[in-house]
Amino acid sequence: MNTLIGLLIIAVGSMGQSSSYVPINKVKNWSWENFWLMQGIFAWLVFPVLGALIANSLPDLITIYGANSAAAFKSVGYGVLWGIGGLTFGLSMRFLGIALGQSVALGTCAAFGTLIPAVLAGDNLFSPKGLILLLSVIVTLTGIVLVGYAGSLRSKNMSE
């Protein structure tokens, strides 16, 4: 049952993340700062608090956050890092374009998100399993580079 609830939470979060770009055609005249501020208010303040209140009552939330303040601060710190990542992702979309920006962002996340946990866990990347991991990252990055290149060619052809 916990696995099902976890998958449901991931699905709801994924829908929320992917739908954040739905109003982008309506706000084309906005500066990126205004769009990201509005998205940030809802994504980082309103919906997390609403989700926490749906999952727990307010007194329970206060107890949860007060029980282990070090874990709460660590969680907030990771949230800040995630926000910085979201901001830099938005900047990459603006300055690199969607095709190249997505490729760079996805490639970076795929590579670091796969390799950093293995390195921090002390895994030997030159063991047979480690080599498979490295090869998988290389294949993934190669695919993302090719998709990014194809997207930039398409963008170039559409603008001509």
Image: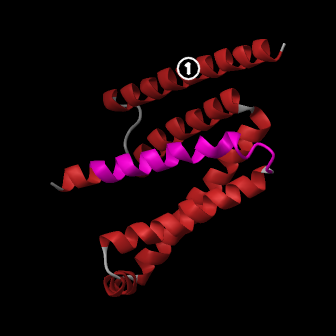
Q: Position of residue 9 (x, y in %)?
A: 33, 53
Q: Nearer the viewer, residue 130 or 155?
A: 155
Label 1 belongs to which residue? 142
Residue 63 placement: quadrant: bottom left
Q: Nearer the viewer, residue 152 or 17?
A: 17
Q: Residue at x 74, y 19 (%)?
A: 155
Q: Is residue 21 left or right of residue 122?
A: right
Q: Residue at x 63, y 45 (%)?
A: 23
Q: Is residue 144 left or right of residue 63?
A: right
Residue 101 placement: quadrant: top right
Amino acid type, label 1: Thr
Q: Nearer the viewer, residue 31 or 25?
A: 25
Query: Up-down: is 140 above or below 59?
Result: above
The answer to whether residue 25 of the structure is visible from this angle is yes
Q: Which residues are magenta?
A: 7-30
At mark 1, the secondary structure is helix
The answer to whether residue 121 of the structure is visible from this angle is no
Q: Nearer the viewer, residue 27 or 111?
A: 27
Query: Up-down: is 158 above or below 86?
Result: above
Q: Position of residue 150 (x, y in %)?
A: 65, 15
Q: Residue at x 69, y 49 (%)?
A: 88
